[in-house]
Image (cartoon, rainbow, N blue to C red):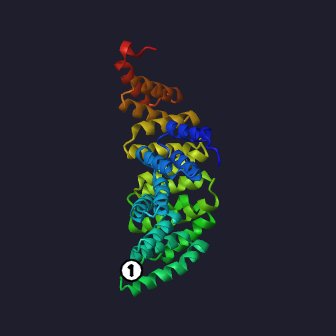
Amino acid sequence: MQRHDYEAEGAYRDRARSNPGAAKVHGELAAWLMRAGRMAQAREALQSGLTQASRTAGLYHILGLIFAGAGEHAAAERHLKRAVAQDPSRFEYARDLAFIQGAAGSVSASVASLRHAAFLGGGAEASGLDWLLRVGEQAAADAKERPARKPPQVSRRAAIIEQLVLRDPEAAEALTAKRGDATAEDRETLRAVRRALVRLTSENPSYPDLYFGISLVAEQLDEVERAIEAAEKALSLNPRYAEAALLAVRLYEKSGRPEQAAARCRQVTEIKPQWLDAHLRLGKLLREQGCPREAADAYRKAVEIDGRCEEARKGLELLEASLPGGGGQ
């Protein structure tokens, strides 16, 4: 019998405790426990992560697979549906949901999920589902069920855009440049660009620019949480990616998380100390959070960069006047 490695388990648990907001560390702990044959503890680790982490699609996916392995189909389907809802662009989430729905006897639902997975997968992945899809459709017809409506087909225009970005990822920036409120055509363009970028990440998972592009697209589609996840992925690959950190600032502000916005803004000022706007934004964020001394420091840096900046000078004067002793150091 293999001796349990308590030291390794302790290391995984320490990482989860020290960074509770990161879904990845909870997933790594659960995966290690699963490999050790400790399914109950793996389930507990995932459920703990779901209460603490902010981007949890991957945790729901793993938990769904655990329930599926235990034959608990209803719980498995519930968790896999949540994974798909949080990240509908992931092929494996839609595929595994289809499998468990089929196992549970929900033929029409399984057919709909298989269609979605085939649409996302493309190439060999999609062709591998073709026969399952045909079997499912036939089963639905034999049971006199009405299969869920087929997802809308991609227009010729969207297909051309997708192929263009696949050939030249830099084209994504021009195609997604903000032009006010997104029209239906704009949204079609954005989704086509995202499909291409997501496919490119499967081939080049270590390219932060691809995740940055996905984040910009998700922001314009008003999918703030998905945009944050992609921006953070870009930063995990390149911690000195100032543009991605600045994008994260904006996204955290939109999602009502000023502390995270300030933390990322401070990172921008460290990476690009001469970016005046970053210091101004940090000053505003810190002032609104009731941190006048830190806010004054940010405005002071802005004044050092550009003494003619009216916003920086006024912000600093107001804060220094409000500090004990007139803001003296």
Look at the picture and state if 50 lies above or below 107: above
| Residue projecting furthest to the front | 1
Q: Residue at x 38, y 85 (%)?
A: 143
For disc 1, the marked residue is 147
Q: Residue at x 52, y 78 (%)?
A: 132
Estimate the x, y position of residue 83 in percent, counting from the top left. 44, 59
Q: Secondary structure at mark 1?
A: loop
Asked where in the image residue 101 lies, by quadrant, the reply is bottom left
Look at the picture and state if 210 lies above or below 267: below
Estimate the x, y position of residue 46 in percent, counting from the top left. 47, 49
Q: Residue at x 40, y 60 (%)?
A: 75
| Residue type, mark 1 in image | Pro
Estimate the x, y position of residue 209 in percent, counting from the top left. 59, 53
Q: Residues within 10 Å of mark 1 (few under 14, many from 20)?
A: some
Look at the picture and state if 71 lies above or below 33: below
In the rendered picture of this protein, how many numbered marks are placed on residues?
A: 1
Estimate the x, y position of residue 13 in percent, counting from the top left. 53, 40
Q: Viewer-proximal residue, 312 or 108?
A: 108
Residue 177 visible to the viewer: no
Q: Residue at x 43, y 29 (%)?
A: 312
